[in-house]
Amino acid sequence: MSESNIDIELSYLRKKIDREKDARKQAEVLLENKSTELFDINQRLQEANQQLDVIVTRRTKALKATAERVEITSDELQNTVNRLSLVLDVANAVTWLFNVRHQTMDIAGKSQSLLGIEPTKAIPADDILSRIHKDDQVQLTEELGFALKEGKAISLRCRVMSRNGSYRWFLINGELSSFGAKRSLCVIGSCIEMHEQVEREREVWRMANHDALTGLPNRNHFETQFNALAGESFVSGEGFTLALIDINDFTQINDTYGHRTGDGVLQDFADILRGYSDHATHIARLSGDEYIVVFKNNIATWSAHELCQKLIDECATMSIQDGERLGLSLTMGLAVFPKDGGTMDDLMQSVYSAVQVGKQKKHIGSSCVLYNSSIERERFRERDIRSALKAAIEHQSFDLAFQPIMCNQSRYFVGCEALFRWPDMGGQWDIQEVIDVAENSGLILDLGEQVIDMAFSKLSHLSDMGVKKWVAINISPLQFQFQDVPHIISKALIKYNVDPAMLVVEVTENIFLENITRVAAVLGQLTKMGVRVAIDDFGSGYSSLRYVQSLPLDKIKIDKAFIDNVGSSAESQGIVNAVINMSHSMNYKVVAEGVETEEQLTALKEMGCDFIQGYLFSKPLSFDELIKLDDFSASAPLVLKTHLGRTL
Amino acid sequence: MKGIIFTEFVELVETTFGYGVANALLEGCDLPSGGAYTTVGTYDHEEILSLVGRLQKLTGTPAPDLLEAYGKYLFPKLAEQMTAMSLKFDGALDLLCSLESIIHKEVLKLYPDAELPSFNIKKINAKEILMEYRSCRPFAHLAKGLIDGCGDYYQQTLSVSMKHLNTDTEFSTLITVRQS
Ligand code: HEM
């Protein structure tokens, strides 16, 4: 290596050392900067770390709390699930989920013992449906459809086949919902066993709506059914015929044969009625002796009438226990819906008035009356009379007229008959009609009491005057049936302090239609009190010599209808003669009513009639007129005059 | 450009051409840094271009050859750094495929101010890859040298061909590397 080369190298190396020094300084500055930078970074890192720690601690705490909560919740959830399944078991219930897409059912709970279904998942819905009672399937599918379409909640009762193959009642509730992660559409619900409850309810309903004795639907049931029936009829435009059946004098059967037999008869009667169910939509027992038959729409009124007639014939020869044959007498009314009444009340009123018409002739046997407009008029007329009567009873605006009765032998007036008068009575009515209405409506009871009281006050007036003449008063059969007549009379006897022998109680033959034992007892009581009893209008109605003979009577009054023809008709005369003889043979006195002519009087005298009453001697008089009658007030025999002024 | 590129270059000149040439090189270039390089410093990449240009004049060897030689020399040094960064590859092609996605990415983490080229690398088959070099600096030949050095490092024979596609705004070169 040459000198210069060495120099060059040396100077290069020297320069290099300088450059390296510079570089080192540069590097040191850089390093120093980097150091500070690093320190700062470290510092920041540390801070960040601390912050991170805080965050992490906070997060950890929160996570722990959440975890604890989840644990508690899951415990609670498990408890709830356990309790729920216990409740389900106790309530005899299962829960179900209907998967709409797959048309399958999941059932949870003791389904095995309740429904006889293994507690499996995804049972085809059709399998479940086939276990539902045929009659409930449609409703269930319908409700399920509504739930799916309109989100309506399901709630229905239906019968589900149980393990032993019998159907039991369940309450099925459900609601549209969704389940699972995919929120699949489903209907979720419960199925609760309520067999006993439903059976009980049905039994209670059956008892509330049926008559225990006959098993027929009762009034309550009929009334609810009627509304439905009327609704249908309005929709279809087809009417129907309704029959009201009233058993005539049923109490007599009870009284004569005993209640057990009476019940048997009613059951037999119900069976006969059931025989008509092919023609009827409804048959019901409204009350003790009232029954209803609603005929089907397609049964015309005339054929309903024929069926009623057939029923009447059937009942006329109904047989009862012990081989004894007994017939029921029926009064039936027919009315047509809606012609004769568009509401139940109106229709029932029409049919009742038809029955009422039939009742008026019940003594001649069964009848079937078709309601018509004249019945309607009659009904209004009756209604008017009834309300006028009611007002009159309230104001005691009645009066009595007295028709004297003459002794055929002594030619004295020996007594009189008190006749009911109503001074303010409407001119379009006659007194007999008014009495009929009073009888039919029961107003006769109040009316009768007022009549008794009035008669007694006049009787006491007479006795105060020292006039010893009897006063006869009419007592209605209804009074005998519903009032304690002996009690009323004995009270009046005490109140007015009169001699019982001066009172004659007149009863019509119709009284024998009532409970005869009771009638006999009541008449016996009256006789014992010293009151005398007369049979009024004898021969006009239901006569039975057997009764006449066995009752404690004093007089027989022969009906005016027979007297009218005495002297002109041999037949009437024969009858009157026979009655007189018969009565005398039983020690009863005979009164002839409505005697108007001398011929009648002569004939009756010849036949030995005891007493005469009629226009021939006097029309009915006011009390003042009566006591002004010399012949009446005097006790000694006088020369009697007829009202024609002729001396006898 | 990172200091290591300069320090290694000066070292290469010193060892290959001697202090005389090194002296002439550093004295002859008007370098802003004055040639006082440290590996931790950062210097303008123009300085390396002036150094390479001056060395071409001093030695008569063309600049691309110089850059290639330098790349070949530099690779083991960079590989040291690579191992320090815990990067390991199965072979040259494996490394080259990971150049953009791993190596230079890691470099950028270490030196946020590093100016790195972009390589779009396509695997043609198991033995051949296509690398598209793009940079605002003309160091495609340095890249070729580095690839050669990489082959040496893994003791694999690589044949490297280049096709320049430079534009006015960017230097771009297609480099095909085939392993035999
Ligand atoms: C065969 C593999 C490689 C090739 C082809 C390659 C290519 C290049 C090229 C061409 C440059 C110059 C910059 C430019 O052109 O814009 C460069 C820069 C650089 N390379 Fe690589 N390189 C490789 C491997 C490595 C390795 C293994 C390391 C180290 C871990 C490394 C670290 C660097 C550094 C530090 C720079 C300087 C960046 C700057 O100065 O700002 N390279 N490389």
Image (cartoon, rainbow, N blue to C red):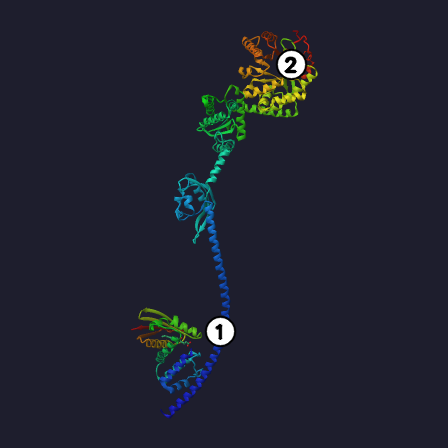
Residue at screen point 47% across, 50% down: A83
Asked whether the beta carbons under mark 2 and mark 1 sit within 8 Å of each other, the answer is no
Count neighbours of disc 1 (C-alpha within 10 A) and say few if under 14, some if 14 to 19, many if 20 or more. few
**Which subunit holds the residue at mark 2?**
A
In the image, taking residue A404 as reference, residue A542 lies left or right, namely: left
- Residue projecting furthest to the right: A465
Query: Which x, y percent locates residue A210?
Result: 49, 32
Number of numbered labels in the structure image: 2
In the image, taking residue A560 as reference, residue B139 lies left or right, namely: left
Q: Toward the viewer: A41 or A454?
A: A454
Q: Toward the viewer: B152 or A92?
A: A92
Looking at the picture, does residue A44 appear above or below residue A238? Answer: below
Can you tell me whether the CB of the residue at mark 1 lies under 8 Å from the nearest atom of ligand 1?
no
Query: Which x, y percent locates residue A420?
Result: 63, 19
Q: Name the amino acid, label 2.
A: Gly
- Residue projecting furthest to the left: B180
Which disc number belongs to residue A42?
A: 1
Q: Toward the viewer: A265 or A46?
A: A265
In primary-sequence order, the first of circles 2 and 1 is: 1
Q: Which residue is mark 2?
A: A415
Q: Name the amino acid, label 1.
A: Asn
